[in-house]
Amino acid sequence: MPTTTAVIGGGAIAKSHIDGYQKAGAEVKAVCDVSKEALEKMKAAYKIPVLTENVKDILNDKSIDAVSVCTPNAFHMEYTIQALEAGKHVICEKPMAMNAEQAQKMVDAAKKAKKILMLGHNHRFRPEVQKVKEMINEGKFGEIYHAKSAWIRRRGIPGMGGWFTTKSKSGGGPLIDIGIHIMDVTWYLMGMPKPVSISGMTYRKFGDIAKYVCSSMWAGPRKLDGVMDVEDFATALIRFEGGKTMSIEVSWAANRNQDDHVYIMGDKAGALLKMDGATTIFGEHDNMIVTEQVEFDKAPYKDRIAHFVDCVQGKAECICTGEHGLLDQKMLDAWYKSSEQGKEVAIN
């Protein structure tokens, strides 16, 4: 029997979940959103039996096996725990929660319910990431001792004045929005060593909503009477057990070129990964230094939704667990704390 699923939250990210479920052969039985407009768009785009403003219509439906939580960040904990307590497996969009305390409650709820809690870190499932991860696991890179990554947007503040730029609703700026992605995929490739401490800073230099200059703005037009109380740039050095380190930069707005990269450095080889799939391997062969541009077959690799369905069906072990999300959240919390205190802080 196909897995029966539902989606809580009907915004743009929900569409990737619905498309993923349908591609994986799962049934999408219901979508819930508090916005009638969002539900009307779902009705026009998909043939989904239940479109509802009441989340209980999903929670009380015993035929639904699994749920995607695609709401704004402030509601991730609430709906994830409700779904788990209702006996559903859950994939929650990033960031996991507003803070590590909330994330811990989500992990505890999954353990109590004996259900899967997966995080929707789609960058772990990029084909080039999976291939490089295989090479690292095979020992071809030797010991991974340092990584350097960045996701820089020159002008990319979303929906300025709306929920994205309101800390009480989003939890933060680019660090929460895109930084979590680049930090998590870098940490994943490093082998997810235990984080020990972080020295981080955050900045807000483009916070005047009326004066902010951009060519376009996704997630809606700016709200001149709205709130912009989150960072627009963040940087950090994270230390891990065994002396491993990661340096990272992330921005929504900065006076520099747009950029994205992940450098992985091992004592036998290294790699540069770009979001367009371009991958460079740095190594040695026959006593010669070798730099190789490589391409990988994308066919063997599944996206996050197909992987989640496999996990629900008992066909795979989850590679992006709630426990991983909790450690991600602890690193984010410590990053903000380090910036506020102006010093390196421990990650407990």
Image (tube, rainbow, N blue to C red):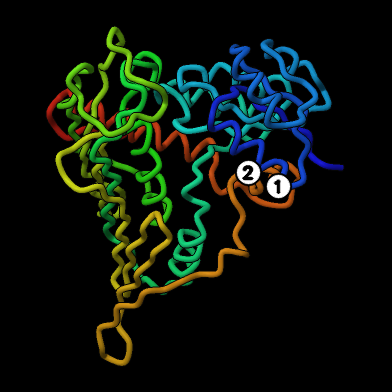
The local crowd at label 2, few if under 14, some if 14 to 19, many if 20 or more residues have their Cα within 10 Å, is many
* Mark pair 1, 2: CA separation: 9 Å
The outermost residue toward the bottom is 286
Is disc 1 in contact with disc 2, using a CB cutoff of under 8 Å? yes
Reading the image, the residue beneath label 2 is 305
Question: Along the horizontal axis of the image, is 331 left or right of 49?
Answer: left
Q: Which numbered dot is residue 182?
A: none
The amino acid sitting under disc 1 is Lys
Asked if residue 264 is positioned above or below residue 71 in the image, the reply reads below
Up-down relation of residue 246 to residue 230 (above or below): below
Q: How many marks?
A: 2
The residue identified by callout 1 is: 23
Describe the element under mark 2 as helix, strand or loop.
helix
Residue that appears at 32% across and 61% down: 264
Q: Which residue is drawn at 15% across and 27% down?
A: 205
Residue at image position (34%, 77%) is: 292
Instruction: Give the quadrant of the N terminus.
Output: top right
Q: Where is residue 176 in the image (x, y as percent from the top left)?
A: 36, 31
Q: Quadrant of the C terminus?
A: top left
Q: Where is residue 331 in the image (x, y as percent from the top left)?
A: 33, 35
Displayed quadrant of residue 167: top left
- The residue depicted at 26 percent of the width and 17 percent of the height is 228
Judged left or right of residue 258, residue 99 is right
Residue 242 % position (x, y): 29, 55
User: Closer to us: mark 1 or mark 2?
Assistant: 1
Q: Which of 206 and 90 is in front in this view?
A: 206
- Name the outermost residue toward the left: 342
